Amino acid sequence: VAKDLALDLPTLHDRGVRLVSEGRTQYFGLHGKTGHLVTAERIDREQLCRLVEKCLLRCEVIIEGEM
């Protein structure tokens, strides 16, 4: 995420970058030392998408201030 946004890690933290997922469970997070997108929770496909062939988990990257 840091690389895709062309931000270094200190700027990433200063800008208040965070990830928001649909629902209560936040499945994704940002690794503090690398800026990589990581899984924050165990993702159980059978529980989330029982009868759906195509299973999607959406998240948004929120950045404070202008880009």
Image: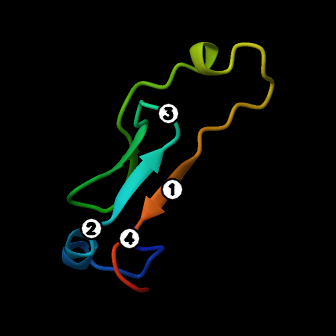
Residue 36 visible at all? no
Q: Which mark is residue 60?
A: 1
Alpha carbon separation for disc pair 2 and 1: 13 Å
Q: Label 4, label 3: how many angstroms apart (C-alpha)? A: 20 Å
Are the residues tagged 2 and 4 within 8 Å (C-beta)? yes
47 above or below 14? above
Residue 23 at least partly seen: yes
The image quarter containing residue 53 is top right
Q: Amino acid at mark 2?
A: Gly
How far apart marks 3 and 2 lie (CA) works out to 21 Å
**Residue at screen point 68% across, 20% down:** 49
Q: Amino acid at mark 3?
A: Gly
Report whether 44 appears left or right of 55. Answer: left
Residue that carries the numbered disc 3 in the rendered image:
23
Q: Which residue is mark 2?
A: 16
How crowded is the residue under tag 4: few (<14 C-alpha within 10 Å), some, or many (20+)?
some
Placement of 2 over or under 35, stated as above or below: below
Secondary element at image label 2 = loop
